[in-house]
Every structure is written in structure tokens, then in C-alpha cells.
Amino acid sequence: MTRGPSDSGPQGAAALRGSMDATTAPHRIPPQMPQYGEANHIFELMQNMLEQLLIHQPKDPIPFMIDHLQRDNDYVPKIVILGPPASGKTTIAMWLAKHLSTNLLSVESLIAKEYSPLAADARMHYQKFKMVPDMLLIRLMQERLKEEDCVRRGWILDGIPETREQALTIQTLGISPRHVIVLSAPDTVLIERNLGKRIDPQTGEIYHTTFDWPPESEIQNRLMVPAGIFEGETARKLLEYHRNIVRILPSYPKILKVISADQPCVDVFYQALTYVQTSHRSNAPFTPRVLLCGPVGSGKSLQAALLAQKYGLINVCCGQLLKEAVADKSKYSDLIQPFFEKEIAVPDNIIMKVLKQRLDQQDCVERGWVLHGFPRDLDQAHLMDNLGYKPNRVFFLNVPFDSVIERLSLRRTDPITGERYHLMYKPPPTIEVQARLLQNPKDSEEQIKLKMDLFYRNSAELEQFYGDAITLNGDQDPYTVFEYIESGIINRLPKKVP
């Protein structure tokens, strides 16, 4: 049997010692390693597993971790919805539960559970005192959350916790929501709204005589007036809610969103849905690899320069790289020069060699990069992807044709001073200067239209290839565009919901 270099022969041992020798430090981590960890969320996986180990403290951690991995439930919904009476929190919770295919838990549903001694005890307390003791309610909740459907599909807590003591006890037991929504509205609006509340005893759906009246006469006939909705009782509940909510909110400082309930219910729902579908900022190490796509004149170069200036990313302009390769007489200059002289496109394989040489340099690996000018079509994107250069943020800057024409066709250059002007945004100071200005042939309307047509002919395939790409309106103030790009880089990508 022949031995490979990793076998225990003298050569293999020498190679192993050489690769592990401390005197050869610092060692360079291959770029593929952080890319793999990032693509597969290794940091978040280990963080979630460690959190669960510390919360549950199993006697045998290995089977516990295996079971945790097999469940694959790190990203199921875990939502708390709070709000004053008549704020619509139950309606929003029900709509979210249906949309996200998750479980809705409320005090009423917990105590209504059949074949549970705890639920029977809670019902008895509720019938006598119109409330459930905190520890009994939390034990009921623990029992429900351990059931398989809650483990697999997640949960939404409607109106729980009601007090700070409940919130702290829930946290102590390791029940940790990912998103907390608090609905808010003026008390006068809530009191008026509560008077028109009606409930369907069969489905539990809540309706309103003014804002949400069911069209079906069958449902209308069976609607009931819920207990405790008269003005005095509502005011008492509001006072109790305000006394408790200010003590609950500090328990969830970083996962909390307050939404105004004084607007149509559909608007409240979509704001809540948007929030629960966002991922909180990760603590994982992150090296940005940004790709900016857009037609000529969309502002890619400016945005790349702003990113490089603020975050220290390496600004990689594909066209500039090719020009530098020729000017520096690099090993690729003889290959590129003939194409420049004939003013024809440089072949993809040559571009990729120059690009690979730049992206492999240590500053790009350590600090990250922002690339623009490549890829321009699907073949180039595949070529780049196959060589392992995968951007983790892709932005498409969309700009209308008229705006691009305005930006580019009015550019002029003074042949004497070299000063650049724009006839609309930066006009020349005198008539004499304006008379001698020249236009670059590339800025003619015909050339601009050809380049834009070429980009938009390929952009649909590129957007499909980069499924997580973020599309932005590039026809606005450049610093506004930069803020959107910055937000897209700093925050995690939104989850795709079918």
C-alpha cells in the first residue's frame, strides 16, 4: 500500500511538523474557512447551542447537543405581544400565528387545556378570583412549551407576561423570546374602541361594530358582548396595565418594538410582521464582501469610495484594475494591451486572473472588499462563484434612463486646466470657460443608451443568481443611498418567507 503525505512516514511527519511549526507564524487562515462558517452560520449555531447548555445544564451534554441539532429549531418564531385592553393585540397575535404557522398561547388557551391537572387547578382559581397565580401560570406555560408542536414550530405569547415578576421568572426559567411587540394607543381611543368589541364564541375571533364587522349574517347573529368592556372597567384595566408595562419593558431592551395601535389593523399587522421577520444583529465576526451592481451613472464608484473611507474596505474597481495592470507592466499587461488598443472587451478569463490576484491579497482577505464593474452577466457571475469569490452583500442600484442621461451627458472637461464641470450641478464660472469645454465621446446619449441596454439585458439573471441581493433606488441623494447600503451591510439579511 502506498502512503500519502499525511501518512506516518518520515516525509509525512516532516510535512506535518512544518505545517504546525510555531516558528512559521503568523499563519494565514484560508479565505474559504470564514466563508464556510459565515454561509452555514457556524458562529450562531455554536452560540445557540452554548446558550441551551447553560440554560438546561444537562447531565450528559453530548446527547443533548445531538438532539438540539436534530431539532433544527434555532430560528422558529418566539414572540411576545403586549398591549393595553382594546389595542388589538389578540387579533394581531392570531393573524401572526396563522401567517407564520406557529402556536398562539394566551392565559385563556392555557387554562382551557384538557387532561391537564395544572390547567384544571388554574381554571378553578380563575373562576373564583378572575386571575391565575403567577407560578401556576408559568408552570402551565412551561408544560405547553415543552410539547412537540411548540418545539418544532415556535410560539406567540398573547398578553404574557402581565407583570415584571412574571417577566423575570420566565427569563430565569430560560424562556427567551426573540421579538417583543408592544402596541400603544391613547387611552381615550382605547376606551371608545372597547365599547364596540364583539367576540365570536365558536372561533374566538374578535370583531368591532365600527371597524371590523363581519359580512356574514350567521356570524353577526352569534356575536357576543365580552364581559368587562364598560367604560369604568376599561379605565381600571388601563390603569393597571400602565402601572405594570413600565416595569416590564426594561426586561427586553434590545428586542422590543413599540407599534402605534391607533391605525388600521392591517397596517399594524404588516408592521408587526416586518419586525418579527427581521433577524437581530449577530455577534459573529463579519468581513464584508460587497458587490455593487448598477447601470453606468448609477453611482457605484461613489458608494464604493464612501464604504472604503468609512469602513476601510478595499475599493476594487474592475476597469481600474485592468488599467493599472497595463500601466504597471504586470505579467498580464501584454495580454490586456491589445484589447485596449482595439477598444474591445477584455476576455473574462483574463479579467478573472487580474481580479483573483487582487482579491487574494491579504488586505482584501482581512479587511473585506467592495467590488464594482464585475460581474456584468451571468457567465461572469458563475466564473467568479466557481473560483470561490462569493460576496456576502449584493446591492443593485436602479436609476431611470432620464436621470442617467442628466448625470452623464451634461459632463464636460476643460482641456486647458483639466477641471471637470457639469452643466447643471457644477456649471463653468465664465462664458469663456464654457466655450472651450469638451465632452467625452463616452458621455454621448447614444453611448449611454447602449451601456444601459446592455446592463438591463443581463440584470434580471444576475438578480436571480444573487437571491439575497438588495435592490435600492439609486435616483436620490448619494448619502441617502449610502445609508441604505450601510444598513444592509450592518444588519443581517432579512429572512425569506414563502
Image (tube, rainbow, N blue to C red):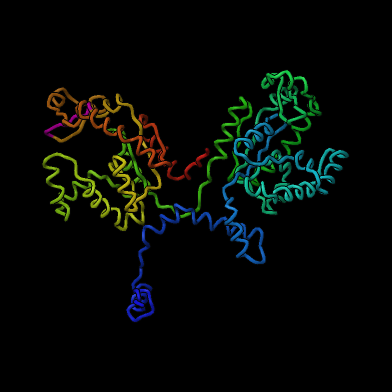
Q: Position of residue 126 (x, y in %)?
A: 84, 40
Q: Along the horizontal axis of the image, is 484 left or right of 209?
A: left
For image coordinates 36% across by 54% down, the residue present is 367
Residue 234: give x, y in percent of width and height: 77, 28
Q: Nearer the viewer, residue 79 or 32?
A: 32
Labels in figure, total: 0
Give the quarter of the image for residue 483: top left
Q: Residue furthest front?
A: 1
Q: Residue at x 73, y 38 (%)?
A: 243
Residue extending farthest bottom: 10
Q: Magenta part mainly helix, strand or loop?
A: loop
Residue extending furthest right?
128
Residue 143 percent location from the top left of the image: 74, 50
Q: Residue at position x 35%, y 70% from top?
A: 25
Q: Nearer the viewer, residue 382 or 154?
A: 382
Asked if residue 409 is positioned above or below residue 127 in the image, the reply reads above
Kindly identify the residue that appears in the image at 19 percent across and 27 percent down.
444
Q: Position of residue 275 (x, y in %)?
A: 56, 38
Q: Is 338 part of what is drawn in magenta?
A: no
Q: Can residue 21 be seen at all in this image of the molecule?
A: no
Q: Is residue 146 left or right of residue 34?
A: right
Q: Nearer the viewer, residue 167 or 461?
A: 461
The quadrant holding residue 10 is: bottom left
Q: Is residue 56 left or right of residue 124?
A: left
Q: Judge from the rendering whether residue 74 lies leftward or rightward of residue 108; answer left or right.
A: left
Please indicate, yes or no, whether residue 457 appears anywhere in the rendered image. Answer: yes
The stretch in magenta equals 409-416
Q: Is residue 410 magenta?
A: yes
Q: Quadrant of the N terminus?
A: bottom left
